[in-house]
Image (cartoon, rainbow, N blue to C red):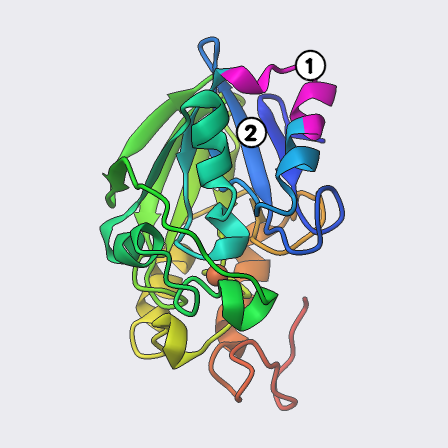
């Protein structure tokens, strides 16, 4: 499904497999790039979705991972084997993916499957940027849900900006996956210090969430109130 010109959602719980986090396709100068790439279980449906949009998966050259969890990058090895697609992640989530750590990647913890070792071809850093047909995609390092969690910000050619939050927004917390409630608020502050027209996150159906600044402010206000990190307290008002 097209979200903006040059931006397509090709995986997610309602469009590929219920294990899958959202994944986004960006054509770039004849090649194709993904932000996240679904699980092994959702892999074939994700490829079918890409073909249905008129694109050839054989042109998938890169996956930029928001973080090293199975639901976001579990299918990366299948892409590598079929198309030679390279995987890029922040260095702090690299080891768990390369060693196939089933707990740290959440594969066994949440999905009842074993992770497999997946080579990581390169590291993402704060400030990295990637030219795509839709504009420029910037990397923000936003640790908290996992040490290597990243968000991506698209400066669209239309002038609009869009945040791809991965699990930095609405993501779960558990020490076993390296989540850290002490550093997560700093990452959220990084998001509220910027302006976005739209945003999306790791576990939603195909949609563009508008009024992004206010919605993100509400999420940050609710963060850390209770055992569920996104629990909304009852004594303040939340427009969203
Ligand atoms: Fe995650």
Mark 2 vs mark 1, CA separation in Å: 12 Å
With 36 as the anchor, is 211 left or right in this view? right
Q: Nearer the viewer, residue 10 or 194?
A: 10
Q: Name the residue under label 1.
A: 54
Picture layout, residue 34 above or below residue 240: above
Whether residue 178 is visible: yes
Q: Which residue is drawn at 57% across and 59% down?
A: 214
Q: Quadrant of residue 50?
A: top right
Q: Name the residue beneath numbered marker 2.
A: 25
In the image, residue 95 lies at what x, y percent?
26, 56
Q: In which quarter of the image is the N terminus?
A: top right
Residue, x 34% and y 75% (percent of image)? 180
Residue 152 image position (x, y, % from top left): 42, 42
Quadrant in the picture for the C terminus? bottom right
Q: In this view, does 209 lie to the left or right of 104?
A: right
Q: Where is residue 24 in the image (x, y as percent from the top left)?
A: 56, 35
Evaluate whether residue 155 shows in this view. no
Q: Nearer the viewer, residue 63 or 9?
A: 63
């Amino acid at each position: 499904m097209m979200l903006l010109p040059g931006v397509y959602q090709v995986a997610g719980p309602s469009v590929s497999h219920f294990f899958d986090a959202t994944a986004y396709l960006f054509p770039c100068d004849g090649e194709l790039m993904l932000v996240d790439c679904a699980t092994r279980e959702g892999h074939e449906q994700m490829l079918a979705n890409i073909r249905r949009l008129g694109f050839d998966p054989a042109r998938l050259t890169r996956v930029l991972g928001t973080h090293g969890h199975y639901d976001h990058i579990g299918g990366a090895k299948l892409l590598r084997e079929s198309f030679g697609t390279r995987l890029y992640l922040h260095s702090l989530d690299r080891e768990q993916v390369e060693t196939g750590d089933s707990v740290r990647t959440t594969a066994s913890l949440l999905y009842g499957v074993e992770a497999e070792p997946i080579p990581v071809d390169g590291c993402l850093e704060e400030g990295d940027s990637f030219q795509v047909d839709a504009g420029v995609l910037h990397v923000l390092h936003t640790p908290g849900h996992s040490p290597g969690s990243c968000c991506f910000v698209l400066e669209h050619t239309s002038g609009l900006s869009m945040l791809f939050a991965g699990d930095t927004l609405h993501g779960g917390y558990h020490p076993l996956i390296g989540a850290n409630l002490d550093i997560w608020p700093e990452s959220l502050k990084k998001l509220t210090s910027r302006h976005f027209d739209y945003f999306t996150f790791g576990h939603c159906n195909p949609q563009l969430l508008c009024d992004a600044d206010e919605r993100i402010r509400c999420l940050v206000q609710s963060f850390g109130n209770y055992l569920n990190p996104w629990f909304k307290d009852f004594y303040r008002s939340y427009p969203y």
